[in-house]
Amino acid sequence: MKMVLDDELQALVLLRSLVDSWDTLVVSFSNSAPQGVLILDIVKDNMFNEEVRRKEQGVVAESEAFISEYRGRTRNRKFHRQDKSKGK
């Protein structure tokens, strides 16, 4: 299926996909859109700027908070990780 989404629809889909912590920015975009039309490039640029601002302030994104290191067993039996608890 080949579906082409116009620029404004892509911007809306992108904004709707954001987590709740971005709600203020989404409302700001919606209220400041020239002639009520969102432009994807402007939305993306402002999102990147906001992300940089948040990182500089030390704000952790919700999606980053759920990242954890896999600590289960490996399926490859030849791989032996020596843990500190087992000694060297």
Image (cartoon, rainbow, N blue to C red):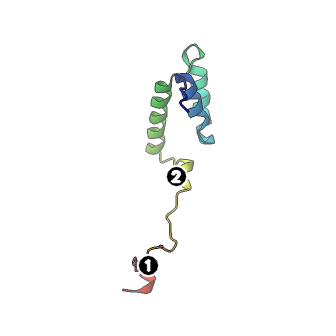
- Image side of residue 15 versus residue 55, left or right: right
Q: In the displayed image of the protein, which residue is found farthest to the left?
A: 88
For residue 12, which quarter of the picture? Answer: top right
Q: Nearer the viewer, residue 59 or 33?
A: 33
Query: Residue 40 at x, y = what percent?
Result: 50, 26
Comparing 25 with 74, the one in front is 74
Residue 1: x, y in percent?
A: 56, 33
Please name the residue shown 49% across and 64% down the image: 69
User: In the figure, is residue 30 to the left or right of 7?
Assistant: right
Q: Which residue ends up furthest to the bottom in the rendered image?
A: 87
Looking at the rendered structure, which numbered label has been put on residue 64? 2
- x then y, percent, for residue 2: 53, 30
Residue at coordinates 63% horizontally, 41% vertically from top-left? 20
Q: Secondary structure at mark 2?
A: helix
Spot the residue most to the front. Answer: 1
Q: Is residue 28 above or below residue 54?
A: above
Q: Is 87 positioned to the left or the right of 2 in the image?
A: left
Q: Nearer the viewer, mark 2 or mark 1?
A: 1
Q: Which mark is residue 77?
A: 1
Task: Tell me, for residue 57, which label it has, or none.
Answer: none
Separation of marks 2 and 1 at Cα, in angstroms: 31 Å
Q: Is residue 51 above or below residue 4?
A: below
Picture layout, residue 69 above or below residue 73: above
The mark nearer the N terminus, 2 or 1, is: 2
Residue drawn at the location 39% of the way across and 78% of the way down = 78
Secondary element under disc 1, as helix, strand or loop, is loop
Q: At 44% from the left edge and 85% from the top edge, which residue is drawn?
A: 86
Of residues 32 and 40, the one nearer the viewer is: 40
Number of residues whose C-alpha sits closer than 10 Å to that of mark 1, classed few (under 14), some (14–19) or many (20 or more): few
Q: Answer yes or no: do the residues labelled 2 and 1 have beta carbons within 8 Å?
A: no
Name the kind of residue labelled 2 in the image.
Glu
